[in-house]
């Protein structure tokens, strides 16, 4: 028998809402997972990628992670992991550093036996490298086998890769596919193999309303997958449906029905009623002890609904001009982020910086190749819909779209609000690079 904790998408270092308290929350959640592993006397902790939120974690993030991993090492609990899309780099990975210190095992095509189970690993594979995918796995003599990887897989609605392609390429009969990337726990069976997501350990967007946790997986003849919850910072979701004549006071009344102390308050406004200034509601929540307050008004004004859009509209004119420029997919992606995306203005610089770093790191020359100019609207639709030439979304961009591409996450499978697109700050990157430059 083998019993392991299957976790992932810990996103250490994410300074959500630009608050240091939120950055600490991600490390605390990972510490809880490790403490549960030690207390539960499991055979290993298996991490399915995106240990870090960014491929350039600060020295503080690295030291905090080392401290948590030492807890496992002191208890003789192995830490087995693969590299996700958020943290992936072209050269040495941070996971290699932890392995060199004896604190982790980077899973790959050769089996790592834990109890009666052989564990294999596959780092995140971008779409551009999936055609003709091959995986030369070593043989094993264990009772069970499991593959740990990161990505958006079928049969789930958000899936973009058929897991049977991996099964066929690996030529190993896997009992389970332990996945990261989607931040919601999901489990299904594909060709007698259990395919399961453990979900994230902390909320990375407001789409993640359910409690956070991890999977406890037991291999003993059959595969048993059970959910375990984590005690994370409270998110208070307030849905306000306004009727005729109702406005900010009604929204405040709804917010006041909850205990807000040290919580993240997320208010959504629907219905009719009067216009509501978000700042007035956010200030009300903060005065009552909330750590963070965010308000999104989903209503459209009558003017917006009835306004006739024509090419005389400035936005349409800009879009038409951009199509005529023949920009590369990388340039179009950056233009979309700066000009037309839902990323909050205060976060655009961080998101663009992350996108550019990802594009350079991936080194895909096709992303920078000029496209043929699109002379008219019909051809523009066809070109814009050609996913083969679209740039892979950067980590935070994918979170904002509801998928960890990066995807990241299918948060994520619904779209997150603009405030959730905030990227982790990179304060202190230079210090971390100076100390451990060989891993950058």
Image: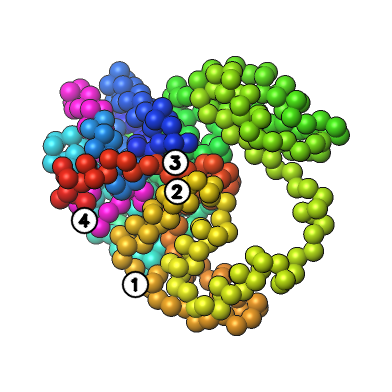
> CA gap, disc 4 to disc 1?
18 Å
- Quick one: SS at disc 3? strand
Question: In this figure, which residue is indicated by the disc labeled 4?
Answer: 91
For discs 3 and 2, the disc positioned in front in the rendered view = 2
Tag 4–tag 1 contact (CB < 8 Å)? no
User: Which residue position is annotated with label 1?
Assistant: 365
CA gap, disc 3 and disc 2:
20 Å
Q: Mark 3 points at which residue?
A: 197
The x, y position of residue 390, in whole percent, is: 47, 67
In magenta stretch: residue 75: yes
**In whole angstroms, how far apart are the C-alphas of marks 2 and 4?**
22 Å
Residue located at (31% from left, 48% from top): 55
Residue at point 36%, 51% (across, down): 85
Number of callouts in the render?
4
Q: Mark 2 points at which residue?
A: 396
Q: Nearer the viewer, mark 2 or mark 4?
A: 2
Q: Work out whether mark 4 precedes mark 1 in sequence or the reverse, and give the earlier one.
A: 4
* Marks 4/3: CA–CA distance: 27 Å
x and y, in percent, of residue 15 in the image: 40, 36
């Amino acid at each position: 028998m083998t019993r392991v904790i299957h976790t992932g998408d810990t996103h250490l270092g994410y300074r959500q809402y630009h608050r240091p308290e939120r950055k600490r929350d991600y490390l605390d959640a990972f510490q809880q997972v490790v403490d549960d592993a030690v207390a539960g006397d499991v055979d290993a902790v298996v991490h399915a990628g995106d240990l870090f939120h960014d491929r350039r974690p600060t020295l503080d993030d690295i030291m905090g992670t080392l401290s948590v991993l030492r807890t496992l090492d002191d208890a003789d609990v192995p830490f087995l992991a693969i590299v996700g899309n958020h943290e992936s780099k072209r050269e040495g990975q941070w996971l290699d550093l932890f392995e060199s210190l004896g604190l982790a095992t980077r899973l790959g095509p050769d089996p790592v036996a834990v109890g009666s189970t052989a564990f294999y690993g596959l780092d995140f594979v971008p779409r551009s490298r999936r055609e003709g995918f091959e995986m030369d796995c070593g043989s094993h003599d264990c009772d069970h086998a499991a593959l740990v990887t990161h990505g958006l897989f079928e049969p789930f609605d958000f899936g973009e890769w058929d897991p049977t392609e991996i099964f066929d390429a690996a030529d190993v009969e896997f009992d389970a596919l332990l996945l990261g990337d989607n931040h919601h726990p999901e489990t299904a069976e594909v060709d007698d193999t259990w395919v399961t997501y453990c979900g994230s350990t902390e909320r990375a967007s407001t789409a993640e309303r359910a409690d956070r946790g991890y999977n406890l997986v037991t291999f003993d003849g059959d595969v048993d997958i059970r959910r375990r919850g984590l005690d994370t910072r409270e998110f208070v979701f307030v849905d306000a449906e306004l009727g005729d004549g109702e406005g900010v006071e009604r929204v405040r009344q709804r917010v006041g029905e909850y205990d807000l102390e040290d919580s993240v308050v997320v208010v959504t406004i629907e219905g009719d009623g009067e216009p509501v200034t978000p700042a007035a509601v956010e200030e009300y929540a903060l005065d009552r002890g909330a750590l963070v307050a965010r308000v999104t008004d989903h209503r459209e004004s009558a003017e917006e609904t009835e306004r006739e859009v024509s090419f005389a509209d400035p936005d349409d004119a800009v879009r038409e001009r951009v199509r005529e420029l023949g920009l590369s997919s990388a340039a179009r992606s950056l233009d979309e982020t700066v000009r037309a995306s839902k990323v909050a203005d205060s976060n655009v610089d961080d998101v663009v910086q992350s996108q550019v770093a990802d594009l350079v790191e991936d080194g895909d020359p096709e992303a920078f190749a000029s496209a043929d100019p699109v002379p008219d609207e019909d051809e523009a639709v066809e070109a814009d819909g050609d996913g083969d030439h679209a740039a892979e979304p950067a980590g935070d961009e994918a979170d904002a779209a509801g998928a960890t591409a990066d995807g990241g996450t299918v948060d994520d499978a619904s779209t997150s609000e603009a405030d959730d697109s905030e990227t982790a700050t990179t304060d202190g990157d230079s210090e971390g690079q100076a100390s451990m430059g060989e891993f950058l």
